């Protein structure tokens, strides 16, 4: 497509319609990523429009960042350049729906809350629940591999994404994966796309594996006088016939944020099944808590709603994703809390996470804290978990911090070589989300 005699903005308007292209300063400022404002905000309403916009971007070498709800725009490094923000919230259709097969195909801009409302009528769900999940788009959840407490039983979107349609940097629409659970493909494109931060292609359509909603679900909150006792409890739960849907660790500050009974540490265990099984497994949870030196009681029905509200990201916070081990949970939590002491009295700290997998979410409110001290805290934590092949990713935080400290952390050189090769194949001109991903990809 030649634009030698026409403006780029006019060409974009021809593709998506004048009302779906904006260069208005206020809107551009609102769409800025880490202080980088785009030249245009483009809001396509169909796959063909996405493809045409990316074809134009390819011809004119425009840097494009796709966004959904915008809840994860401070994940990764600041972009090295930005010409257009592609707002995907106009693609909200349910394309195919197969309740008997437990699958659904949707456009990338539909929110998880809208999809949940559709599925709830037949008691099926997509069990993915990161903070603020209801307002986040499915495409955004996949691109960032977002996950929450339900990961303990249902895994992440890598386990739930069956197929994906995406538009590559040249504007070509490609399908990868399948629309049914049993299909097998040789090259797993969906798994490549999960967590790729839109650097390999712009997601437009996703086929998802659903699960039946349990007949009954209750949550027990097991409280302990130490993180060591909480770790011992988790070990008992994992080494038992229990099948919890969530096994979430909370430190004292996190419990306060959820308006729960105070304790040094607690583990929220949710059981979903038929009513009798839930009751029987709940009795085991209470027994295991006593044996570990604590006690368990039923949590309020609104506990997980409070949890979601408490950990929805807000300005001034740094959020870390820490991959530890279930056998090192207590050590890791203790180190985080000791390290927090060096950040100043204003740096409030909440620790949560999937205790069943040893992954922690650390939320620091940095108001008044020294960013240099915060960077040192991240590096000390990386050194600690690195001894047993753990990792620390800065999920969100001030741009100046993420510009000075690699938000992704060290990566195996062989893996980085592979990722660069994939980027060369999918986006050789480095036009999609340039600079924000691992290794500056």
Image (cartoon, helix red, strand yellow):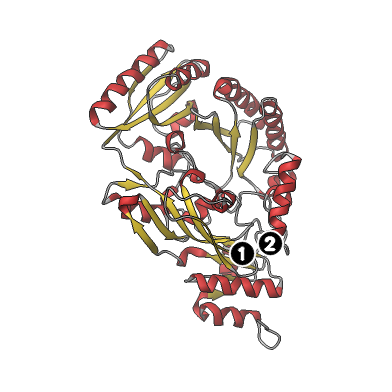
Please, is residue 263 above or below residue 165 in the view?
Answer: above
Please, is residue 144 above or below residue 30 in the view?
Answer: above
**Label drawn at residue 415:** none
Q: Nearer the viewer, residue 58 or 295?
A: 58
Q: CA distance from mark 1 to mark 2?
A: 7 Å
Q: Residues within 10 Å of mark 1 (few under 14, many from 20)?
A: many
Most distant residue in the bottom direction: 5
Disc with the residue nearer the chain's start (1 vs 2) = 1
Q: Is residue 336 left or right of residue 120?
A: right
Please, is residue 172 above or below residue 291 in the view?
Answer: below
The reply to whether callout 1 and callout 2 are in contact (CB within 8 Å) is yes
Q: Is residue 330 left or right of residue 290?
A: right
Q: Nearer the viewer, residue 73 or 318?
A: 73
Residue at which label 2 appears = 427
Residue at point 35%, 14% (across, down)? 287
Residue at point 28%, 22% (across, down)? 280
Q: Is residue 404 left or right of residue 252?
A: right
Determine whether the residue tagged by mark 1 lies in a helix, strand or loop: loop
Q: Nearer the viewer, residue 244 or 262?
A: 244
Residue at which label 1 appears = 168
Give the percent coordinates (x, y) of residue 249: 47, 28
Determine whether the residue tagged by mark 2 lies in a helix, strand or loop: loop
Q: Nearer the viewer, residue 342 or 129?
A: 129
Give the percent coordinates (x, y) of residue 152: 45, 33
Q: Is residue 347 visible?
A: no
Q: Quadrant of the N terminus?
A: bottom right
């Amino acid at each position: 497509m030649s634009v030698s005699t026409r403006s780029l903005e006019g060409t974009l308007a021809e593709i998506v319609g004048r009302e779906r292209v904006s260069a208005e300063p206020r809107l551009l400022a609102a769409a800025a990523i880490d202080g980088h404002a785009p030249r245009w905000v483009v809001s396509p309403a169909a796959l063909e429009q996405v493809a045409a916009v990316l074809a134009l971007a390819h011809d004119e070498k425009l840097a494009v960042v796709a966004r959904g709800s915008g809840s994860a725009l401070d994940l990764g490094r600041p972009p090295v350049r930005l010409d257009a923000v592609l707002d995907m919230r106009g693609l909200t259709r349910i394309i195919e729906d197969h309740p008997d097969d437990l699958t659904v195909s949707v456009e990338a801009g539909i929110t998880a809350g809208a999809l949940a409302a559709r599925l709830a009528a037949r008691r099926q769900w997509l069990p993915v629940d990161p903070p603020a999940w209801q307002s986040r788009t499915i495409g955004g959840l996949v691109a960032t591999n977002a996950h929450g407490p339900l990961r303990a039983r249902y895994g992440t979107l890598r386990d739930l994404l069956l197929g994906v349609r995406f538009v590559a940097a040249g504007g070509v629409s490609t399908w990868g994966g399948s629309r049914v659970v049993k299909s097998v493909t040789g090259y797993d494109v969906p798994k490549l796309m999960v967590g790729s931060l839109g650097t390999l292609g712009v997601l437009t359509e996703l086929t998802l594996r659903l699960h039946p909603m349990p007949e009954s679900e209750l949550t027990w909150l097991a409280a302990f006088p130490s993180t060591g006792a909480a770790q011992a409890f988790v070990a008992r739960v994992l080494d038992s016939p229990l099948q919890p849907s969530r096994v979430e660790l909370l430190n004292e500050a996190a419990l306060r944020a959820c308006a729960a009974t105070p304790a040094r540490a607690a583990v929220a265990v949710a059981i979903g099944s038929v009513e009798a099984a839930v009751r029987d497994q709940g009795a085991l949870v209470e027994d295991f808590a006593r044996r570990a030196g604590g006690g368990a009681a039923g949590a309020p029905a609104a506990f997980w709603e409070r949890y979601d509200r408490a950990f929805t990201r807000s300005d001034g916070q740094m959020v870390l994703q820490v991959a530890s081990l279930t056998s090192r949970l207590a050590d890791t939590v203790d180190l985080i809390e000791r390290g927090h002491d060096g950040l100043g009295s204003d740096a409030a700290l909440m620790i949560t996470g999937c205790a069943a997998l040893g992954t922690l979410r650390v939320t620091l409110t940095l108001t008044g804290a020294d960013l240099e001290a915060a960077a040192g805290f991240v590096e000390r934590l990386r050194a600690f978990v690195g001894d047993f092949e753990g990792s620390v990713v800065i999920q969100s935080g001030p741009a100046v911090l993420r510009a000075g400290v690699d938000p992704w952390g060290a990566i195996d050189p062989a893996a980085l070589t592979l990722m660069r090769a994939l980027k060369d194949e999918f986006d050789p001109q480095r036009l999609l989300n340039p600079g924000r991903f691992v290794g500056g990809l």
